[in-house]
Amino acid sequence: MQLLNVILIVFLIACAIAVEKTRDLLSAVIIFASYSLIMAVLWLLLRSPDVAMTEAAIGAGVTTIMFIAVISRTRRMEK
Amino acid sequence: MDDLIVRNISRMIIPFIQLYGIFVVFHGHLSPGGGFPGGAILGASIILYTLAFGSEKGHLKLPHSIAKWLESGAVIWYIILGLFGIFAGHVFLTNKPAGFYMGQAGDIISGGFIPMVTLAIGIKVASTMITLFHTMIEEEEH
Amino acid sequence: MKKLIMFTALGGLLFIMISSYMQMPPMGNVDNPSYNEVAEYYLEEALEDTHSPNAVAVIIMDYRALDTLGEATVLFTSIAAVLTVLVGKDPKPGEEESHHG
């Protein structure tokens, strides 16, 4: 269980750095959704299923759709 | 998006998503979950419908004229529930001493005003998300 | 020169954060300052006070119901602001009823 925690946190940091480094905004949004999913699993391991459900529904679902809706009305590539 | 596979899979999967959302909202005082996750799940199901079937058909599911009543009504319902505590001689948002029906612990209808508040929050969150998404999508047309 | 100053500042900040993290009590310990009599009261009296077995729901919907009302107000304000900015302009003559949320 300790090893799984460490692996998830390393993935979390990698996702956070990748979101900042990616020039393609659509890819950045997808990476951000995976960040939210890893965060939801971490909340579940911390024994707070309420926050995990909220994170999975809002962070990975609705926020991603909102970002994609905004990108569809503006540019895709970062200048 | 006009895709046969996406439309058929959405038509199959949306009732189960909505059933799960309603379960999470109504069991907010018994199991993990509550108003915010349940409302987000319900809102996500309608957003999926809009993505699969287009903006016009999705907008018919929750028009702005209904959404504005849901938005305002949920908050007003919450405040009215809180005022019951004041009229009963206690502080704002009092549960047990204000005389709500408490019931048996573990039943669906129990826990005083907690299920009613959860229902209001769930309706509010679902309506907010659907309205936000529809507003952002619709603006392209005019 | 600018980079040197920046790295010095960030390194100092990192040192302060790590050294303060070392002083924190272990996570989930019963002797932590955050586990005080308020948490004990909630865990012991929640079932008796509200007849609801979910302690988290009892805290956010009953003991801290005013905070939840504040969250609902935040949602209401956000949706009002979005509707005002995005669809508040130039209402078409026939559609005023359906486009004013």
Image (cartoon, rainbow, N blue to C red):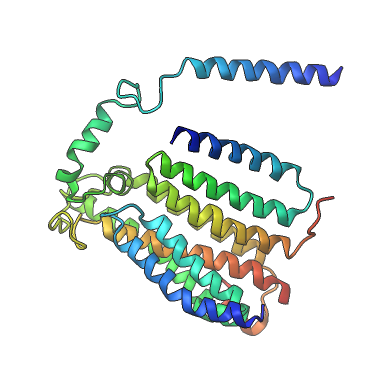
The reply, left or right, for residue B107 in relation to residue B23 is left
- Location of residue B71 in the rendering, given as x and y in whole percent from the top left corner: 45, 65
Q: Is residue B126 above or below residue A34?
A: below
Position of B21 with respect to C21 (left or right) is left
Quadrant, the N terminus of chain B: bottom right
Q: Is residue C31 above or below residue A54?
A: above
The residue at 43%/36% (across/down) is A1
State the quadrant of the C terminus of chain B: bottom right
Q: Please tell me which residue is depicted at 31% across the width and 57% down the height of the picture.
A: B117
Residue A24 image point, x, y percent: 77, 53
The residue closer to the viewer here, C101 or B131, is B131
Observer-nearest residue: B105 or B10? B10
Residue B62, position in %: x, y? Answer: 50, 76
- Regarding residue C97, the answer to whether it shows in the image is no
Q: Quadrant of residue B120?
A: bottom left
Q: Is residue A56 above or below residue A10?
A: below
- Farthest right residue? C1
The part of the image, by quadrant, that contains residue B79 is bottom left
Is residue B26 visible to the viewer in this orientation of the structure? Answer: yes
- Residue in view at x 53 percent, y 67 percent: B130
Q: Give the farthest residue toward the bottom.
A: C94
Spot occupied by residue B110 in the image (x, y as percentages of width and height):
18, 58
Q: Quadrant of residue A46?
A: top left
Q: Is residue B3 positioned above or below C46 on the image?
A: below
